[in-house]
Image (tube, helix red, strand yellow):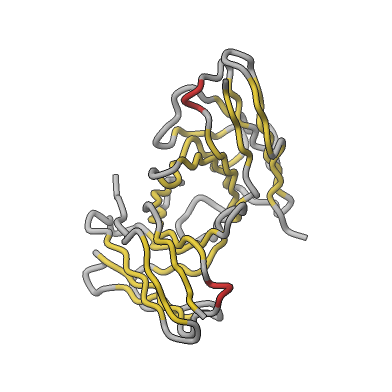
Amino acid sequence: EAQVTQNPRYLITVTGKKLTVTCSQNMNHEYMSWYRQDPGLGLRQIYYSMNVEATDKGDVPEGYKVSRKEKRNFPLILESPSPNQTSLYFCASSLNERGTGELFFGEGSRLTVL
Amino acid sequence: DAKTTQPNSMESNEEEPVHLPCNHSTISGTDYIHWYRQLPSQGPEYVIHGLTSNVNNRMASLAIAEDRKSSTLILHRATLRDAAVYYCILRDNAGKSTFGDGTTLTVKP
């Protein structure tokens, strides 16, 4: 089954404790992207990757890092999480970066930073 | 950056058509218009997309204004399972995507 898998689905952590949210897709997609969803603000793009070793900033990249060492994986790294990074995070993938492609989303990772 | 504007909420009766509007007055010539919907506790799900011409698929129709500054998602016969938050998104050809705030659709039996 074609899918985008995120882990963990739920996480409570404390300020400053580094964490990684993993994202994996099994569709051989070139393009992957991370979003955060906050009440009243909709979804905002954090980082995206058009292929292995190619990443770019979205609209809200501050406080986040990403890497794309393999085509299927695109982890989101919070080096020193802060309470304002409490949010619902979604990973998505698409065949390519062009607008013709449908985005496939994971089920989300709810992060709480205390 | 391109931005989309949608009404916060809309209501429909079951088995009636629903027209969900989206304004994107700053759209650029290469931006594609996408629509996704999100059910509670799930990730957004693709509905339809287009560039200039109107589009139809098994889920919905997309009507795009001639100047491309607005679009309308049309659900031909709303069902209770269509109750969701609907997002209008602009995707460019370089990886960036801009979401609207979404319209919460309520379907009444």
Q: Quadrant of residue B31?
A: bottom left
* Rendered location of residue B6, percent (x, y): 32, 60
Q: Is residue B31 above or below residue A68?
A: below
Q: Which of the image's four quarters has the C terminus of chain A?
A: top right
Q: Which of the image's four quarters has the N terminus of chain A?
A: bottom right
At a point 34% along the width and 72% down the height, the residue shown is: B72
Query: In this rendering, would A84 be left or right of B3?
Result: right
At a point 71% along the width and 37% down the height, the residue shown is: A7
Q: Is residue A48 above or below residue A85?
A: below
* Rendered location of residue B41, percent (x, y): 61, 52
Q: Residue furthest right?
A: A1
* Rendered location of residue A102, percent (x, y): 54, 60
* Rendered location of residue A56, percent (x, y): 47, 34
Q: A40 and A29: which one is in front?
A: A40
Query: In this rendering, would A28 be left or right of A98?
Result: right
Q: Is residue A100 above or below residue B96?
A: below
Q: Residue furthest front?
A: B109
Q: Quadrant of residue A9?
A: top right
